[in-house]
Amino acid sequence: MNCPNCDRYTPDDSPVCIHCGAQLPEVGTSPSSARYPQNTGTARIGTRSTGRGVFSGWNIVIAGVVVLAGVLLFFLLRSAPSHGYVTEFPDGPVDLSTMIVSGKTNIVDMYSEYCPPCRMIAPYLDKLAKKRPDIHIIRIDINRKGHRGIDWGSPIAAQFQLRSIPHFIIIDGKGKVLEEGKPAYKKVVKIIRAAGIR
């Protein structure tokens, strides 16, 4: 007979539906009353089969694929920055050789959120990275997490012997340092102006 609850076939000798667990009418009951039982005022409680529930096999597989795709996309976007613009927030010494992109001019900008000139030039660097695909911008926050004010005592400030920021380093596509400090800053300003960025 077909179950009046889920309309799936269940052997006649079973008192409950093997699919949804609902109580079946006794054999010999008229088809109309078996298919459409009258409301007795009490709710019918049955356990749904895991094959049709929210946590069914296919739903778990689909959810797993979606989560995996999301995680993969997150790491791909993180490791391959859009328009060559990277912001790093390291708490220790940095290895610039792992950040540069070969075949491009790499501009390293060491900054702090507490530095007004750093904040002023940041939008221009963003526009430069979008306008010039041959330039790769690497921004490195010299502050350790939680430090308020410019963190002159940070490992990065000590590593590069920083006395002022923004501190620029221009590196070619082969890893050779072309300019650093004030000469690099002047060169970056010239590149921004030559690109017509306002």
Image (cartoon, grey):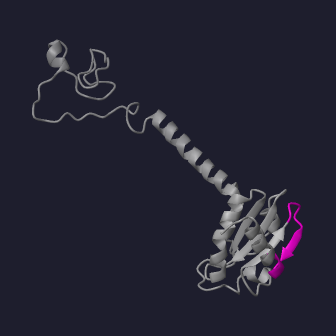
Above or below, comparing residue 93 to residue 101 in the picture? below
Residue reaching furthest to the left? 40
Q: Is residue 99 visible?
A: yes
Give the magenta-colored segment's residue range.
172-184
Q: Is residue 71 left or right of residue 125?
A: left
Give the x, y percent position of residue 91. Answer: 68, 75
Residue at screen point 29% across, 29% down? 21
Give the x, y percent position of residue 163. Answer: 76, 87
Residue at screen point 86% across, 64% down? 172
* Frontmost residue, 195 versus 152: 195
Q: Give the tally of numbered discs.
A: 0
Q: Quadrant of residue 171?
A: bottom right
**Quadrant (top left/top right/bottom left/bottom right) for the N terminus:** top left
Give the x, y percent position of residue 174. Answer: 89, 61
Residue at screen point 80% across, 69% down? 95
**Quadrant (top left/top right/bottom left/bottom right) for the C terminus:** bottom right
* Frontmost residue, 164 versus 28: 164
Above or below, comparing residue 44 to residue 108 in the picture? above
Residue at screen point 70% across, 54% down? 80
Q: Is residue 88 visible?
A: no
Residue 13 inside the magenta-drawn segment:
no
Q: Is residue 116 left or right of residue 10?
A: right
